[in-house]
Each structure stands twice: as structure tokens, then as C-alpha cells.
């Protein structure tokens, strides 16, 4: 089954449609690559997907292990490289304060998140710096 469809709208913009739900995301080229930067760029989505995937997998892990997961946020900084133009580094600051997890649980949470599908997919191609606040 098709996951999504992408249509070029012109002027360096695309409309991405999630087939099952009909949810749409508009992308725009970033300012440093001839765009307006008016919304997420495709590389912004890739960077954001990394943290979103981590938080989702951590949520699944917590649900499967009866661990209360009250708070999880991430701030992502995407660093672009050249020759060829690509995402060269992601700096991700994760905030899990307020969950009151013990050290043993924190290690399990880190392991779950760092082995999410997006992390595994990008691990050999993008440098990732993770900071955890428990």
C-alpha cells in the first residue's frame, strides 16, 4: 500500500499527503537553498523525524514495560554539509524531566530511542549528538 504522495506545487514547494489519513504537509526550500523558508524543508522533516521517531519508540517501550512516560520533548538543530549538499549533523537535546526514572530505566530509555528505525537508517550517514536531561 502506498504510504504517501508528493506533488510539486511550483516555486520550490511540495504538498505531501499521507494516503491513509489524508493529512497534508507543505514543504518549502530553505532560504540558504533558493527557497523562502516559509515552512519545513524536506531536510527539516528528516531531522525532525529522527527525534519524533525516538520519542515514539520510547513511548512504545514504556507502554510495553509499564513505565510511566509523562514528559518528553526534543529540540533539533540541523547542520548542513556540502559536496554534496546533505545533512551532516544533528544536535538533539532531549528533555525527559519530570518522569522520575531511576538510572537503570534511563539507560533502557536511551537504548530504546537510539535504536529507533530512523536512527538505525541514518546512523552511517549523519553524525548525531544527543543530550539527555532526566
Image: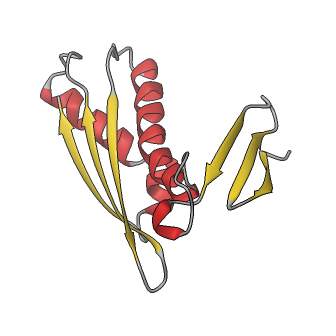
The single residue placed furthest to the right in the displayed view is 1
Please tell me in which quadrant of the rendered image residue 19 appears.
Answer: top right
The single residue placed furthest to the left in the displayed view is 103
Q: Residue at x 44, y 86 (%)?
A: 83
Q: Residue at x 84, y 47 (%)?
A: 2
Is residue 5 or residue 100 the one in the foreground? 5
Please tell me in which quadrant of the rendered image residue 66 appears.
Answer: top left
Above-or-below relation of 133 to 49: above
Q: How many marks?
A: 0
Is residue 114 or residue 77 the one in the foreground? 77
Is residue 37 or residue 65 the one in the foreground? 37
Side of 64 where 19 appears, left or right: right
Identify the image quadrant of the C terminus.
Answer: top left
Side of 72 where 46 appears, left or right: right
Side of 132 where 23 appears, left or right: right
Q: Residue at x 61, y 54 (%)?
A: 28
Is residue 30 or residue 107 the one in the foreground? 30
Side of 98 where 50 appears, left or right: right
Q: Residue at x 48, y 32 (%)?
A: 56
Residue 127 at x, y percent in the picture: 32, 66
Residue 23 at x, y percent in the picture: 73, 31
Residue 59 at x, y percent in the picture: 43, 25
Residue 86 at x, y percent in the picture: 47, 72
Identify the image quadrant of the N terminus.
Answer: top right
Above-or-below relation of 29 to 94: below
Colour scheme of the picture: secondary structure
Amino acid at each position: 500500500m502506498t504510504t504517501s504522495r508528493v506533488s510539486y506545487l511550483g516555486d520550490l514547494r511540495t504538498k505531501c499527503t499521507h494516503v491513509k489519513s489524508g493529512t497534508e504537509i507543505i514543504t518549502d526550500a530553505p532560504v540558504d537553498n533558493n527557497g523562502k523558508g516559509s515552512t519545513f524543508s524536506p531536510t527539516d522533516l528528516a531531522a525532525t523525524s529522527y527525534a519524533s521517531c525516538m520519542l515514539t519508540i520510547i513511548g512504545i517501550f514504556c507502554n510495553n514495560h509499564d513505565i510511566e512516560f509523562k514528559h518528553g520533548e526534543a529540540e533539533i538543530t540541523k547542520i548542513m554539509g556540502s559536496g554534496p549538499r546533505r545533512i551532516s549533523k544533528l544536535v538533539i537535546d532531549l528533555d525527559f524531566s519530570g518522569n522520575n526514572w531511576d538510572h537503570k530505566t534511563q539507560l533502557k530509555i536511551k537504548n530504546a530511542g537510539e535504536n529507533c528505525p530512523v536512527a538505525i537508517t541514518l546512523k552511517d550517514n549523519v553524525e548525531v549528538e544527543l543530550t539527555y536531561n532526566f
